[in-house]
């Protein structure tokens, strides 16, 4: 089973007031989760066991992953608050087991679990004193970053996987700030070591005037479209067929970012 890119690069922290940054992002997580819960409430009893947009995962797998991810970020928030070295997950095996065990549950149980895990995440965030938002936490990937980035990472999980449910929420529904920020971050990643071997491509967002170059060398291909459509392609949520290409060459195959 695969779980494509849902983990953003380090979010730029131009605002020195980390508690204010975190509070703003937590409000965005609340709104994104509200929309997710609305979608899940409309999923039928049989549909929850149907395939998601992620190869090998049912919608139940996606929902179980979202709930357990919220709990894993509670661990990191608790570590930032107490100074204890609390891993995000006890192990990779424990993470995988939680998803597998949670996947077959009926939609009512999935919905209740999502609500409860979101509440635990919000409660853990509310307990952090202001100075704890600068405390470093360690992601399961090994990346180390300030606790103030955890709300953005949760936002990315909810937004990307809401699309992965394949239940009516599409990249066109992504908030513009989310899409713009993630576009910059993923394009930046593909302009670096992650894009090794990738031919240079210029990306132009027609609606936001965002511009980026991925890969190495001088771009021989320009790809244009709405920033949400460009992000969908960069993040593996679209094949990019609707994007305009100059000249009309095929899009390159992007390396996995997860």
Image (cartoon, rainbow, N blue to C red):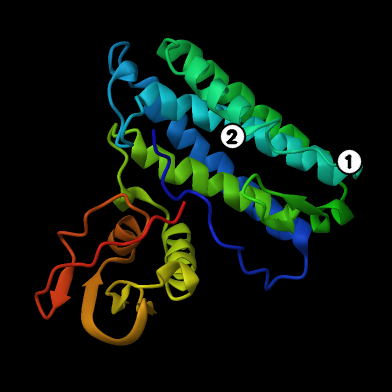
Q: Position of residue 21 (x, y in %)?
A: 69, 59
Whether residue 128 is visible to the viewer of this picture, yes or no, is no
User: Do tag 2 and tag 1 residues touch (Cβ < 8 Å)?
Assistant: no
Q: How far separated are the C-alphas under marks 2 and 1? A: 19 Å
Q: In the rendered image, which quarter is residue 55 located in?
A: top left
Name the residue that disc number 1 marks: 84
Q: In the rendered image, which quarter is residue 105 located in?
A: top left
Which image quadrant: the N terminus? top left
How packed mark 1 is, by other alpha carbons closer than 10 Å (few <14, some 14-19, many 20 or more), is: few
Q: In the rendered image, which quarter is residue 91 located in?
A: top right
Which one is nearer the viewer's eye here, 119 or 134?
A: 134
Q: Position of residue 229 (x, y in %)?
A: 28, 60
Measured along the vertical axis of the image, is residue 3 above or below residue 38?
below
Q: Position of residue 63 (x, y in %)?
A: 46, 26
Q: Position of residue 81 (x, y in %)?
A: 86, 43
Labelled disc at residue 18: none
The residue sitting at the front extreme is 197
Which one is nearer the viewer's eye here, 257 or 209?
A: 257
Whether residue 65 is visible to the viewer of this picture, yes or no, is yes
Count of all numbered marks drawn on residues in the image: 2
How packed mark 2 is, by other alpha carbons closer than 10 Å (few <14, some 14-19, many 20 or more), is: many
Provide the secondary structure element on which disc 2 rests: helix
Name the residue that disc number 2 marks: 69
Which one is nearer the viewer's eye here, 178 or 80?
A: 80
Q: Is residue 255 left or right of residue 248?
A: right
Q: Is residue 34 left or right of residue 57?
A: right
Q: Answer with mark 2 or mark 1, whichever residue precedes in sequence.
A: 2
Which one is nearer the viewer's eye here, 131 or 196?
A: 196
Provide the secondary structure element on which disc 1 rests: loop
Residue drawn at (31%, 30%) of the image: 52
Q: Is residue 97 left or right of residue 24?
A: left
């Amino acid at each position: 089973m695969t779980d494509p890119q849902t983990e953003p690069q380090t979010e730029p922290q131009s605002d020195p007031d980390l508690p204010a940054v975190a509070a703003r992002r937590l409000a965005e997580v609340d709104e994104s989760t509200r929309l997710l819960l609305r979608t899940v409430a409309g999923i039928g009893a049989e549909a929850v066991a149907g395939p998601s947009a992620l190869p090998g995962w049912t919608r139940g797998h996606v929902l179980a992953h979202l709930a357990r991810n919220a709990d894993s970020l509670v661990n990191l928030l608790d570590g930032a608050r107490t100074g204890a070295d609390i891993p995000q997950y006890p192990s990779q095996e424990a993470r995988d087991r939680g998803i597998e065990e949670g996947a077959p549950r009926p939609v009512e149980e999935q919905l209740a679990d999502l609500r409860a895990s979101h509440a635990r995440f919000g409660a853990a965030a509310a307990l952090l004193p202001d100075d704890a938002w600068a405390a470093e936490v360690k992601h399961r990937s090994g990346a180390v970053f300030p606790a103030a980035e955890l709300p953005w990472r949760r936002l990315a999980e909810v937004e990307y996987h809401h699309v992965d449910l394949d239940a009516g929420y599409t990249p066109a529904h992504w908030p513009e700030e989310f899409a713009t920020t993630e576009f910059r971050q993923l394009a930046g990643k593909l302009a670096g070591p992650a894009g090794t071997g990738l031919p240079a491509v210029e990306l132009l967002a027609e609606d936001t005037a965002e511009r980026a170059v991925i890969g190495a060398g001088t771009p021989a291909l320009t790809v244009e479209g709405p920033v949400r459509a460009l992000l969908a392609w960069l993040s593996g949520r679209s094949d990019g067929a609707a994007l305009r290409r100059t000249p009309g060459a095929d899009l390159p195959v992007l390396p996995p970012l997860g």
